[in-house]
Amino acid sequence: MNKKFLLGVLVAGVCGLLHADDKGVSVKTSGFDGVKEVTLKPYGSSSCMSFKQTCISVGAMWKSDLNDLVGLDLYALRDLVIMSDLLINIDGDIIKAVRVRDASNLNTVGMYKESFQRFAIQKSDFEKLLKAEKVWLKINRTDGTYIETYLINDGKDTLAFKALQRFSKNIQ
């Protein structure tokens, strides 16, 4: 009986390791039209390492019917932020993401504040981002201020950067 139990624990552990690569990634295929959709729950960028500033978490979305685009889902935690623009510095090359108008939200529950905005970038820019040594985000706010945070900076990466790498394995 102990051998069966240990074998069961071992099998469960190995299965858990096999699926650990997809942590936070969800893959669905529509029964309606066959469109594949891959989503990534948000993970923290460098700004989340301090409680003194707005934490920017980054998630993602991709659909097979819009194959050349990747949606970056930005969440601002601890503050209500209306995000107007997203600039991405990929190893010195600055690109401007396209704001998706109907994909935003502001939420307050008690003292908790959260803002959401989706931006779209070309899949080729997303692939460059994954190979970069330095990726900084500059989020312009409607009040004229901005928030800066990095995903990777001189080899120092974040949970968000690692999650985007996991996400990328599922988009073809």
Image: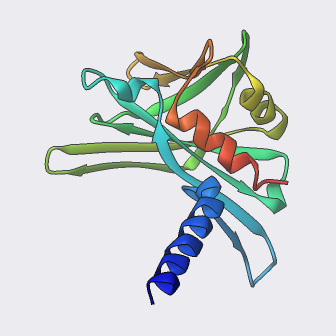
Q: Quadrant of the C terminus?
A: bottom right
Q: Position of residue 102 (x, y in %)?
A: 55, 52
Residue at x 83%, y 61% (from the top left corner): 65
State left or right for residue 90 relative to residue 156.
right
Residue at x 48%, y 21% (from the top left corner): 149
| Residue at the left extreme of this rendering | 110
Give the mark count.
0
Q: Position of residue 72 (x, y in %)?
A: 61, 42
Q: Position of residue 24 (x, y in %)?
A: 54, 56
Q: Position of residue 109 (x, y in %)?
A: 20, 53
Observer able to see residue 89 = yes
State left or right for residue 35 relative to residue 79.
right
Residue at x 80%, y 34% (from the top left corner): 127
Q: Quadrant of residue 142?
A: top left
State left or right for residue 60 relative to residue 111.
right
Q: Quadrant of residue 153?
A: top right
